[in-house]
Amino acid sequence: MNSPAPGFGLIAAAAGKDSHVDPLAGIPTVDEPLKTKDFKTDQEVRWCPGCGDYAVLAAVQSFLPELNIRRENVVFVSGIGCSSRFPYYMNTYGMHSIHGRAPAIATGLAISRPDLSVWVVTGDGDALSIGGNHLIHALRRNVNLKILLFNNRIYGLTKGQYSPTSEQGKVTKSTPLGSLDVPFNPVSLALGAEASFVARTIDSDRKHLTGVLRAAAHHRGTALVEIYQNCNIFNDGAFELLKAPDTRDDAVIRLEHGEPIRFGADGQHGVSRMPDGTLRVVDVAEYGTKRLLVHDAHAPNPEVAFALSRLADPSSLNTTAIGVYRDVHRATYDDLLHEQIAAAVDDEGSGDRPVLEDLIAGKDTWHVDA
């Protein structure tokens, strides 16, 4: 892949004046509409029968035509794990990289080629164990890329060891007496890293999954989407409470911006802020509708979004909020970098002077006479 597209300076300048600039601006569009089949490759899709990855792949392939951009300008970068086979099945550019390093590779790609739509596909082990450092720094820098984090709460590719999201007490091949680790809550982690877009969805809820992907694609900056994904071989039923028809209504809190947070088959449950500032699931009949918390995904301060993420008990998942937790606009690393480069060149007048040479031979260097 070559040098940045000619229009990247205009994109950066526009972003500097208006943080609501379309994240797809500057990416070449197609002459004729694409279809789902255009994003399918001739490779045999090889995951275990019944794996949740199939549902996510189908949702992504059916959603991408909406973006109306060329397949040649879409890139999927993955690390190591079951989910990381994703690039083989996408008829776009892609890279199956090394364990945990996908965000770092995608960062270099995104900042050097603003004419690309860059996506990272990773798993709970790949992203939160060896790749944890790369993940949090991509989030805080707000690079213009999208991260799909498949969370099945287990290591699937290496045959069933516990992962950074496995619940305490989890008995696996690597924790025969039960895990002692306190698991990560990926949404809480992302919010703590100052991510500008954070969402959670479920593999089997096609409509919700597609809606979250759509929102992530139209966000300028790093968008992290955690996808609860079932591993039916090594951790089957990990999210059954959130999926089973007889329990899901009372367990899943669906977040809608601008709407009171209310759930249950008859809307009998709600979320309210307590006097001590914490959030609690309440009985609507007892508390009334006026005391329910109204979800604000665009709130500048992430404290309420973080409190919502804590409603998910990693051991029981009795209640879990899905949807967009946070969607705020702030300058992206890409735009700031291009502005900095442009300013450095402008300071040199015509740009003929060797800027790099000036930096190397600046006041922090000296000559030693022979």
Image (spheres, grey):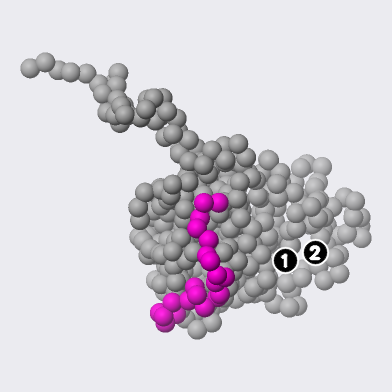
Residue type indicated by callout 1: Val
In the picture, the quarter occupied by the N terminus is bottom left
- Using the image, determine if residue 196 lies above or below residue 354: below
- In depth, the one of 3 and 357 nearer the eye is 3
Residue at image position (63%, 62%) is: 214
Q: Which mark is residue 252?
A: 1
Do we see residue 179 in this rendering?
no
Specify whether residue 253 is painted magenta. no
Instruction: Check disc 2 and report the residue beneath it.
Output: 263
Magenta region: which residues? 25-45
Residue at image position (46%, 56%) is: 116
Percent of width and height locating residue 97: 36, 61
Q: Is residue 49 left or right of residue 268?
A: left
- Using the image, determine if residue 148 lies above or below residue 351: below
Do we see residue 49 in this rendering?
yes
Percent of width and height locating residue 146: 53, 56
Specify whether residue 32 is painted magenta. yes
Tell me which label, 1 or 2, sits earlier in the chain: 1
Tell me the CA gap for discs 1 and 2.
7 Å
Residue at image position (82%, 71%) is: 265
- In depth, the one of 235 and 210 nearer the eye is 210
